[in-house]
Every structure is written in C-alpha cells, then in structure tokens.
Image (spheres, helix red, strand yellow):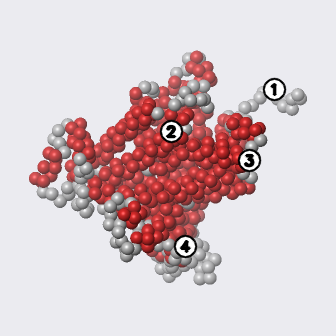
C-alpha cells in the first residue's frame, strides 16, 4: 500500500477533536449548533441588541399586533403587550434569563456532580452502595416536585429556583460520572498507568477525564434542555422569576388573560422556549451520534 | 423469582425509609416552628402546642422524634392542613385518585400511540419515514407542556368547541365519591344518567390526558425504535430469515415480542417524568388532582401539605416503578434468573 502521508510523524486527534469531526458531518446538527450559538450571542449581548428596554412602557401603543399584521407598527416588530412593552426586546432579554441562566445552572451542577461522582467512584463498599440507593431514590422523585419542595424551603424568587434546579440536576451528573469513571477504571490502559505508579487522582486527571468528557457534555446538553423547561415552568407557575421580569415562562403566564384578544403574547414566548429547547436537543443528539460513530470507527 | 422478589422488597423498604427521613427532615428545613410544620396546628394556643410537642416527643432525642413521626404516619395521622385545617390523609386520599386516573390514562395513550410508531420507524430504518418520525419526536419532547396545554384549550375548546377545557366532570352530574377514580365511581353509582355521565367524564379526560401523553409518547417512540433495531440485528432473526419466513412473519412472531420486553423495562423510569408533566397539566386544566393541590399549597405556604404530598406522590411513583419491574421480570426470564441462557 502506498503511503500518501509524507510526514513520518502520525498525528492522532484528541478524543474531543474526533468528536468534533464526526459532529460536523450532519447538516441538521450544524443548523442546530448554529441556532445554539445564536442564542448564546443573544444571551450575552441582549442589552446592546434589543431596541427598547424590557420594562419600558409605551402607553400610546398598547397591545399592538406584530408588524406583519395590518394594524401592526414596524417600530414594534413583534408587537407590544398589555402594558405597551416591546415584545421583541422582552424576548431578547428573556434569552439571557431563560437560556443564559440555564447554561450557568448546568455548568454549576456539572462541576459539583463530577467532583462528587468521581470521588464516589473511588470509594467502595457500604458507603458507595448507600450513595447508589440514595441517588436512585432522589432520581425517582419527579424533578418538578423536588424543585417545588426546594423552592418551598428557600422561598420563591429567581435565584432560589436556580439553586433548586442545580440541586435537581446534580444527582444525574453524579450518576453518569460515577458509571463512566467505573467503566474506564476497568480498562487496560488505566491498569498500565497504575503499574507505572500513578495514584488514583492522577489517573483520574490524566487518563480518565479526557476519555469521559464527551459523555459529560452530552449529558449536559440533555440537562440544559431540561433546565430551560424547568425554569420556564416554574416561572409560569409563578414560583420563579417575578412577573415584570422578561423570563419566557413568566411572560407566558402574564399573557394568559389576553390569550383571546392578543394571542401573540402567548405564542411568541412559547415559540422562543420551543426554539431554544429544540436547538439544545439537536446539539445533544448530534453529540450522541458522533459518540456512537466514533466508537464504531 | 423468590430472590428477585426479596431484592425488590429490600429496595422498597430502603426507599421508604429514605423518603420518610427526607419528609421528616423537611419539617426542620421549612421556615417556622418545626412542631407546627409537622402537625399543621397553626391556630392553637401555647398550651395546645405543648400538647402536640409531647405527642411528637419534641423534648426527646431526634431518633425518638423520628420514631414518633413514623408512628403517626402509620396510624394515618399525617397532620392537618395549615390552610383548610382538614386532615392531610383525607385530602391526599381525595386528590391522589384523580391524578392516578389522569397519569394512567396518559401512560396508556402514550404506549398505544408511541410504541407502534417506534416500530414503524425501526422497520423503515434510514429512510424518509424514519427521519420524519424522529424529527417529529424531537419537536414533541421539546414543546413546553404548559404552552401545549394552552394551545389545545384555545383550539379544541374555544375555537372548535369540541371538548370541555376544565375539570373532571360537568357539575350537572352528582357522583358520590367511593373510590375517587371517577370512572369506577360512575359505574358504581345508581344514577339514571350513568351513561351520560360516563360520556361526559370521558370527554373531560381526553384533552389533559393527550397533553400529558405527548412527551412520554415521543420517548416511547425512541425507546421502541432502538429496541426494535437491536432485536433485528440478533442471530435468531437471521435464523428466521434463513428459514425463509416472510418479513411480516418475522416482525409479528419474533421481533415485536422481544422488542416489547425491553420497552416495558423503561416504562417505570418514565413514570416520574409523566407525573411531573401531569402536575403542570392539572393546574392548567383545573384537574382536581394532587399536583394542583400541591402547587396551591405552595402559594399558601402550607408546609404540612407539601410534606405529606411529597411522601404520598413519591411512594406512588415508586410503587409503579416496582410494579413495572415485576411485569418485566415475569415477561423476561433473563432478568430474574441469570442462569437461564446467556445474552
């Protein structure tokens, strides 16, 4: 066989790079990833992009329909709500609250979950079996119910719901990290570095984490779509963000009374939630496909 | 099977222990006096509180307090609601059946619709149908449930006027509560308008049950698809093909049965998710279930109710979980006894 590679040195891409290579194969996933980046952009620069302030009232233009309607006004592209607040600005600011905060929530619970999960994978015996059962019990309680109980302890409010969702997500991360670390620990390359005299922490850091990081990221995207839905649901139930805040769920709850005369106040926040969850799920789906493709290759 | 049962029983006892500890510790974590939180006696004078404190062993060690709490639970005394001053156990008994009715109907709909669609997707693997089903499933489990509920109310109740939008049954029918499950109560009652009431109750349950069922149905689609794909790759399917069976014979006689078994294993795991969805749906459709009752208790800071509701709802979920485990074990010998064959 002819060598078409003229360089002596062979380069192996890192697991993460291989994942990226497989990830960008599918066009649908690429679109989803594009939407995801777009949402991140909106979340970071919301106050620069949005045309008005999210709480500014335009009392001469209450309940304006979106601009494509006959009665719409192009200066309020997506219409206004019952207090004359611009829907577009509110939706853009809502990206920071619902989408941006869900990202932070997932990040915090990922870090805590991975630390506890990998430490628990190193322990054996009664302690680890107890933890396993305990996690099973926590995971069998519905996430919303758990969040509601935590909100009841801490009191309603946006920051408290965020902590509640962090605590709901942590067990999932512990579970997945634990299983992944234990699975890797049984492999031969770990044994090799153990024979070299590396201690457990060093093995975790240098051998195991680079190999399980993509599993964690794929779980994180799942968790993020759940977190978006949970933040919005708690906002909708009036337990999360207070009503004047442009959080998508709270906006939807605000629009219910006007559903019949101003349906866009309900359609638009709902579509925004749907869009962000679909984008997140597409990224996660692409990640899992890429993982599978990498394992098979 | 005996070992399997014992193992499940062990798990069940352990879980109940943990849940009761969790619920007991909640009374300390909630704001306010622990003894008021645990008993719900909010309108009593200091002497009354002292009596309750004695009853719950407040002055003894934490272990005997917990023991007293357990005794109260087993005697059916779950405290009284802080807002309505009715016993929590009665409230739960009157609200939980409505939730059971809704969730079990929704689970049924989700399985009946989701699993066949998943099989169809698997049979048409990597074709247009498969892609279409998968994309629809993706959208299905991304829809926020409260938004979907509002849209269905707008379309089917307000614009088309086909189905009622709120409640469990029209107020015209007077049905005495016996079991709490509306359909059984209607059949038990001796009202002359039994069948009209039955029709009315079924038209009330259609919308909320379909709304709850959508997201689990899409998950069943994916589960059924994966499990069918795995079955189609096994050796016994190849053997059946080599025998010259037609594709339909293979699917109906061999593949569906074996794929179903794996789907049933995951039904229990989906149930917690389904109850979460049902809680929100109950609020939107004013369904008199335990989810709506719990969410209202939060608005009213009724900590005794939250504590009891958490315990009741999670034990219900866990019971369903164990029940599906048993069904799975009865259907699949590999799951209960490892010596039967190999994978």
Q: CA distance from mark 1 to mark 4?
A: 67 Å
**In whole angstroms, how far apart are the C-alphas of marks 2 and 1?**
57 Å
Residue matched to label 4: B155
Q: Secondary structure at mark 2?
A: helix
Give the residue pinned by disc 1.
A8
Q: Residues within 10 Å of mark 4 (few under 14, many from 20)?
A: few
Q: Nearer the viewer, mark 4 or mark 3?
A: 3
| Cα distance in 3D space between marks 2 and 3 | 29 Å
Dot 2 and dot 3 residues touching (CB under 8 Å): no
Discs 4 and 3 carry the same chain letter: yes
Q: Which mark is residue B247?
A: 3
Q: Nearer the viewer, residue B52 or A154?
A: B52
Task: Characterize the local packing of mark 3: few (<14), some (14-19) or many (20 or more) Cα atoms within 10 angstroms.
Answer: few
| In this rendering, position of residue B48 left or right of residue A217 | left
Classify mark 1: helix, strand or loop. Answer: loop
Instruction: Give the answer, above or below, for where B91 lies relative to B238.
Output: below
Query: Mark 2 highlights which residue?
Result: B329
Q: Nearer the viewer, residue A263 or B174?
A: B174
Which chain does the numbered disc 2 sit on?
A: B
Position above or below: B31 against B13 = below
């Amino acid at each position: 066989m002819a060598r078409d590679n003229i360089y002596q040195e062979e380069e192996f891409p890192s697991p993460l790079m291989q994942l990226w290579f497989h990830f960008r194969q599918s066009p649908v996933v690429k679109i989803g990833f594009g939407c995801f980046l777009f949402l991140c952009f909106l979340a970071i620069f919301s106050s620069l992009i949005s045309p008005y302030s999210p709480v500014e009232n335009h009392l001469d233009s209450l309940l304006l329909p979106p601009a494509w309607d006959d009665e719409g006004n192009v200066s309020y592209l997506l219409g206004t709500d019952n207090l004359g607040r611009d829907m577009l600005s509110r939706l853009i600011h809502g990206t920071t609250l619902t989408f941006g905060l869900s990202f932070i929530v997932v990040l915090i619970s990922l870090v805590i979950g991975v630390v506890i999960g990998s430490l628990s994978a190193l322990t054996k015996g009664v302690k680890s079996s107890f933890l396993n059962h305990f996690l099973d019990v926590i995971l069998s309680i519905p996430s919303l119910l758990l969040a509601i109980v935590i909100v009841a302890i801490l009191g309603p409010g946006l920051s408290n719901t965020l902590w509640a969702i962090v605590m709901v997500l942590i067990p999932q991360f512990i579970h997945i990290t634990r299983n992944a670390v234990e699975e890797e620990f049984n492999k031969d390359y770990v044994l090799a570095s153990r024979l070299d005299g590396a201690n457990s922490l060093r093995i975790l850091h240098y051998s195991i984490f680079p190999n399980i990081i993509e599993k964690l990221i794929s779980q994180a995207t799942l968790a993020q779509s759940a977190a978006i839905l949970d933040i919005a649901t708690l906002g909708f139930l009036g337990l999360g963000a207070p009503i004047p805040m442009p959080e998508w769920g709270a906006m939807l709850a605000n629009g219910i009374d006007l559903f019949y005369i101003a349906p866009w106040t309900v359609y638009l926040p709902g579509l925004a939630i749907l869009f962000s969850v679909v984008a997140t799920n597409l990224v996660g789906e692409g990640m899992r496909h890429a993982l599978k493709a990498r394992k098979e290759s | 099977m005996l070992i399997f049962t014992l193992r499940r029983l062990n798990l069940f006892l352990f879980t109940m222990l943990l849940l009761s500890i969790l619920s007991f510790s909640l009374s300390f974590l909630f704001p306010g006096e622990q003894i008021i939180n645990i008993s719900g006696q909010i309108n009593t004078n200091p002497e009354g509180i002292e009596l309750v404190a004695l009853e719950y062993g407040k002055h003894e060690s934490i272990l005997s307090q917990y023991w007293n709490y357990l005794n109260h639970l087993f005697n059916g005394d779950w405290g009284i609601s802080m807002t309505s001053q009715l016993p929590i156990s009665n409230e739960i008994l009157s609200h939980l059946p409505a939730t059971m009715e809704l969730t079990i109907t929704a689970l049924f709909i989700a399985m009946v619709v989701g699993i066949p669609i998943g099989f169809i997707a698997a049979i048409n693997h990597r074709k247009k149908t498969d892609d279409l089903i998968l994309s629809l499933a993706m959208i299905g489990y991304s829809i926020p449930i409260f938004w979907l509920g509002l849209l269905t109310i707008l379309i089917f109740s307000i614009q088309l006027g086909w189905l009622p939008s709120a409640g469990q049954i029209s107020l015209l029918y007077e049905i005495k509560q016996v079991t709490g499950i509306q359909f059984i109560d209607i059949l038990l009652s001796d009202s002359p308008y039994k069948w009209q009431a039955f029709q009315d109750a079924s038209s009330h349950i259609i919308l909320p049950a379909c709304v709850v069922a959508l997201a689990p149905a899409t998950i069943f689609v994916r589960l059924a698809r994966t499990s069918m794909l795995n079955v189609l790759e096994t050796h016994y399917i190849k053997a059946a093909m080599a025998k010259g069976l037609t594709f339909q014979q293979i699917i109906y006689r061999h593949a569906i049965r074996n794929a179903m078994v794996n789907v049933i294993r995951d039904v229990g795991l989906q149930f917690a998710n389904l109850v979460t969805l049902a809680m929100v749906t109950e609020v939107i459709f004013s369904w008199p279930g335990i989810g709506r009752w719990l969410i209202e208790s939060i608005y009213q800071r009724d900590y005794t109710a939250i504590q009891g509701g958490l315990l009741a709802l999670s034990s219900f979920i866990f019971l369903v979980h164990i029940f599906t485990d048993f069904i799975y074990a009865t259907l699949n010998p590999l799951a209960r006894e490892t010596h039967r064959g190999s994978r």
